[in-house]
Amino acid sequence: MKHARIAWAGAIQSAVESEGQLRIVQGPHAGRHVGFDEVVWLPPLTPVAQARTVIALGLNYADHAKELAFKAPEEPLAFVKGEAALIGHRSFTHRPAHAAYMHYECELAVVIGRTARRVKKADALDFVAGYSVANDYAIRDYLENWYRPNLRVKNRDTCTPIGPWLVDAADVPNPMALQLQTTVNGRVTQSGTTADMVFDVPTLIEYFSSFMTLNPGDVILTGTPDGIVNVNPGDVVVTEIEGLGALSNTLVAA
């Protein structure tokens, strides 16, 4: 099932995809169908929980590491971002006026469904609630080190669209065999497959849960393949993952 979190009729609502529309599933409007264009899309992290911790991976695709003239890492390279960076489908991302180079990153987002601590790789997928599409924008002007991006590169408000759906883990039998694609103004600029991750989803859950507790609603952004290009105000960027949906985002001047 595909879950969504929306703002409609003056309230935040939980909904699911139903017959090409959104069917509200909680509250006084439960059972009501509304169109995709009638709502404001929010990060789809319910019905699990709001995100507590968002963990993002760097250089987790070998082709992307090569694109940046780096070798693939020997252990996961991770950084944490705040919830304010997250926005929903069809939202607007601010591009700093003085930035010279800002690019998208189409990423598989893994949403944790139950508390995970010292999880073994063989059991890791049992702790996943579902999957979504993320676009983890980066502003390279501020990059001090490819391995350690600072907060201004990766943790900016509005710079991590996620959605439109949270797809139940049961409906994604193999998260490591999904096609990814990005278009900018309708032109394909990035394509790849989750099969090319350096560290797959079970490995990442085992690794992170070995030293930190993963809670329901926590999100792991798993990196991006090669094919990044600079984007500018007015550009419409669509990041899409097979079976999970197409996440649309528009750049505006900050």
Image (cartoon, rainbow, N blue to C red):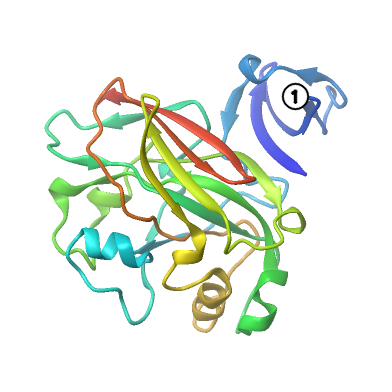
**What amino acid type should be assigned to the residue bearing mark 1?**
Gly
Residue 149 visible (yes or no): no
Image position, residue 198 (x, y; %): 41, 72
Horizontal side, residue 193 vs residue 217: left or right: left
Q: The C terminus appears in which quarter of the rendering?
A: top left
Please give the residue where the numbered disc 1 appears in the rendered image: 20
**What residue sits 78% from the left and 44% below the top?**
1
**What residue sits 51% from the left and 40% below the top?**
240
Image position of 135 with respect to 171: above or below: above
- Mark 1: which secondary structure? loop
**What residue sits 72% from the left and 41% below the top?**
2
How dense is the environment of label 1, judged by Cα within 10 Å: few (below 14), some, or many (20 and up)?
few
**What residue sits 27% from the left and 42% below the top?**
103
Image position of 253 with respect to 237: above or below: above
Residue 133 visible (yes or no): yes
Image position, residue 5 (x, y; %): 66, 35
Image position, residue 54 (x, y; %): 47, 57
> Which residue occupies the foreground of this view, 132 or 179?
179
